[in-house]
Amino acid sequence: MEGVYNCIINAVGKEERLLAVLIDPDKFSLSKIKRFIAKVNASIATHIFVGGSTVKDNDTQVLVENIKKNTILPVVLFPGDVTQITSEADALLFLSLISGRNPEYLIGKHVEAISKLRLTKLEVIPTGYILIENGKETAVQRVTETKPMPREGLNQIVDTAKAGEFLGMKLIYLEAGSGAQHPVTTEIIASVKRELNIPLIVGGGIRTKKQLDATYNAGANMVVIGTAFEENESFIEAFKKDTSHV
């Protein structure tokens, strides 16, 4: 089976647009998993991300197990802490919060995770994670005790993303945060994309098809949508696959 990262690289080479649905174990009821994943399967989603800033022990594993029973889409961990690592998933975004200066989230948590990762066959994908100011405090900000990068600090955001690439990151993830008031601007996305030679992921605050298209058009290779699906499942109807030619 081809790895998750190689599939992303191949899709980017073909200029395909990737869409990940983010499911937070702390906010999601297992009772609706079968119906919800059926809608995801019928949509244009290409990946399922699982993770949150604060999740109870074992909740991630139980959720991933149930997701895997209902889909063939790759399930990728987007962990807020080492307790969210489970071998049931296909891959793990090994997130380094390069927008912050808390050493725990630059390297500390990663060292702590190794003893668990040794016991899994998870595909580990080094990912530079950049939190962008969105108009309100996010859970990531509270948990990591780091400040997001100001939206007007374009050069600093671009330089941070490029530094992440030079450090060996395989992906760069621009994040406005869960429930963001404002998504990452198209100017920021386009400016970062021009500098990168690796895939760009963008998430946070995207609630409409128009915003999704604008994010892709600005240069995002993968877009992550979470809160919009969590709060209003009918939102996913706008992203149904076109089966007219099947």
Image (tube, helix red, strand yellow):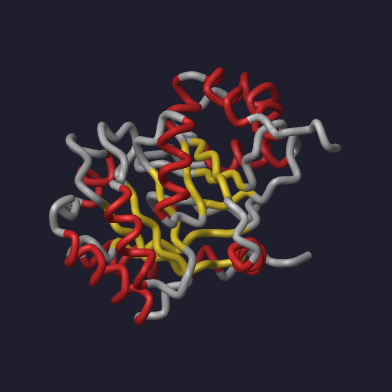
Residue visible at 53% across and 51% down in the picture: 77
Residue 70: image quadrant is: top right
The answer to whether residue 242 is seen in the rendering is yes
Residue at the image point whose x is 19% and y is 60% from the top: 154
Horizontal and vertical percent for residue 37?
Answer: 66, 30
| Total marks placed | 0
Q: Whole-percent x and y of residue 10?
A: 66, 67
* Left or right, 54 with reference to 233: left
Direction from residue 55 to residue 90 in the image, left or right = right
The residue drawn where x is 40% and y is 53% is 218
Q: Which residue is drawn at 28% across and 45% down?
A: 140
Farthest right residue in view: 246
Q: Quadrant of residue 246?
A: top right
Rendering coords of residue 222 (x, y %): 51, 52
Mark yes or no: residue 112 visible.
no
Q: In this view, does 156 lie above or below 137?
A: below
Q: 127 or 198, which is in the foreground?
A: 198
Q: Nearer the viewer, residue 238 or 165?
A: 238
Residue 209: percent from left, percent from top:
48, 32
Q: Nearer the viewer, residue 172 or 106?
A: 172
Q: Looking at the rendering, which quadrant does residue 211 occupy?
A: top left
In the figure, 245 relative to 80: above or below?
Answer: above
From the image, which quarter does the N terminus lie in?
A: bottom right
* Rendered position, 204 above or below 36: below
